Image (cartoon, helix red, strand yellow):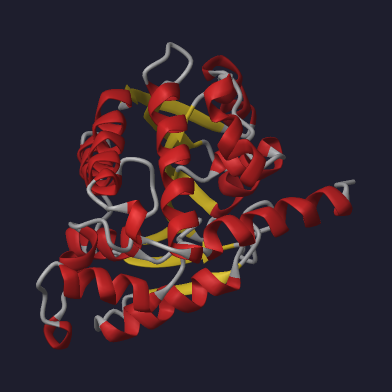
Amino acid sequence: MPDNSVAARDLSRLSAFYGEMTSVDGVLGGARAAGLDLGDLSAADLYTRGLDLHNLGGYPELESVAVAVELIAAPTSDDLVLDVGCGLGGPSRFLTDRFGCRVTGVDLLPLRVDAATALAERLGFASRVEYRAADATSLPFEDGRFDQAWMLDVSIHIRDKRRLFGELARVLRAGGLLVVHEQMGPLPPAMLPLKRRAPYFAPSFKQFIGIVEDAGLRVQMWQDTTALVLAEFYRRRDVLSSIDASSLRGAAAVAVRRGHRLIEGYVDTLESPAGRAGIMVATSQGH
């Protein structure tokens, strides 16, 4: 049986960590700062600028994952795709734009589901994507419901990976694809500032693949994306460094200082041999 007290602590830490990043007003403020017309926004206006993305590699990662999937079996307009850990909904709207598929996004945090839903409605996506609050280790869907399941930089926050991948295998149809982008472990000391703020559980590459295949999924591809993700963190570091922190006070100053620490933790990790990240595509073997 899961330890409910541990699960509650993990949820509390994730709520605090991602709650700071979850704001529709923040997304729209970023769009305004980029010179976009808020009365005529498209989904691509947001996700190509990373404004509604919290995956490690931002928009370049999304493109790389899409290209990798196209080598095996791209979603079609008839397909239903599950977006696990949907966040603000940027990846799900990217999927619908690129492939024409329908998407159901799930996230553990209702705040993020509400934000994703509000953005989808504003962008005219309400009939193409839907978002639900749900625990990825206990999904509220029948067996074989989805043609594909995408999970971008989410599994690292989930303790019970065997239960997680068992659920993903269950809700995929036979022959359906599981598409994952993730950072492998073991995590070096540079990640300690992040581990203090949110739960991080990163098995080694060998352990990760073993867990996936034990769930009834057959790995078809692994593609290293470390250089791509590292380039995105260099870009974020440059953006943050352009802010004059000495002019800030209170919460804004704290947020900038914290952002610097978190980015440096990722940069140090990804520059080390222990910091690999990559795309995994696996096929469901049925139930």
Say which of 206 and 229 sits in front. 229
Residue ranking furthest to the bottom? 39
Q: Position of residue 211 (x, y in %)?
A: 62, 27
Residue at 11% x, 81% y: name it: 37
Q: Nearer the viewer, residue 282 or 109?
A: 109
* Image quarter of residue 52: bottom left
Decide: is 69 above or below 50: above
75 or 181, which is in the foreground? 181
State the image coordinates of residue 238 (x, y, percent, origin top left): 23, 41
> Residue 148 location in percent, x, y?
41, 51
225 left or right of 134 in image: left
Residue 187 in view: no
As drawn, the residue found furthest toward the top would be 273
Instruction: Examine the rendered structure and indicate whether residue 26 appears above or below residue 168.
Output: below
Query: Please, which residue is most extreme toward the front here?
Result: 246
Q: Position of residue 25 (x, y in %)?
A: 36, 78
**Of residues 1 and 236, the one drawn nearer to the viewer in this rendering:** 236
Residue drawn 79% across the image and 57% down it: 8
